[in-house]
Amino acid sequence: MRKCPSCNMELKEMQYHKQTVDMCPTCGGVFFDHGELETIVQIVDIFKDIELSEEEIDTVSRYEKERILLCPECNVELCAKEIAGEIIDVCPECRGIWLDKGEIIALKIAENHIKEYLNLYIRLAE
Ligand SMILES: [Zn+2]
Ligand SMILES: [Zn+2]
């Protein structure tokens, strides 16, 4: 059973637009398998329906970025990777992506930016 890298709770499998993801019921973090660029684009797509309140946007900057998280799948340390100025945690082994709630909100905010600069990110991902 996969555990949340942040609070160590068991992750629950959920269907998100045809993709199965593991979500933490406690902190709202989400683990995506095989974090290739399409997945990031897909994530942005998935979260496009989320409506954000001003309050939630305010909390983003308060999230702790200097922390060590272990991949729920392979138990190796996740690497921080910058996408559209936001940090996401990517597993160097399985290429899974861990997003905590703040990161989901941040990516949501960065959605238009990511779409605009998609070609640039494709080159960076190579
Ligand atoms: Zn959690
Ligand atoms: Zn992994």
Image (cartoon, helix red, strand yellow):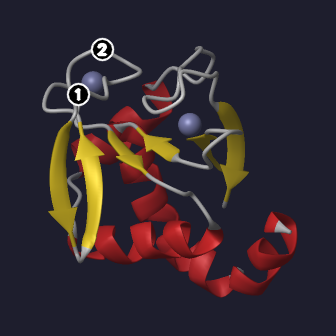
Could you say which quadrant of the image residue 34 lies in?
bottom right
Amino acid type of disc 1? Cys
Which element carries disc 1, helix, strand or loop?
Answer: loop
Residue 36 appears in the rendering: yes
- Separation of marks 1 and 2 at Cα, in angstroms: 7 Å
Amino acid type of disc 2? Cys
Badge 1 is on which residue? 27
In this picture, residue 38 sits left or right of residue 31? right
- In front here: 2 or 69? 2
In this picture, residue 68 sits left or right of residue 98? right
Does the residue tagged 1 have its C-beta within 8 Å of any atom of ligand 1? yes
Could you say which quadrant of the image residue 4 lies in?
top left
Which element carries disc 2, helix, strand or loop?
Answer: loop
In this picture, residue 96 sits left or right of residue 5? right
In this picture, residue 116 sits left or right of residue 40? right
Residue 51 appears in the rendering: no
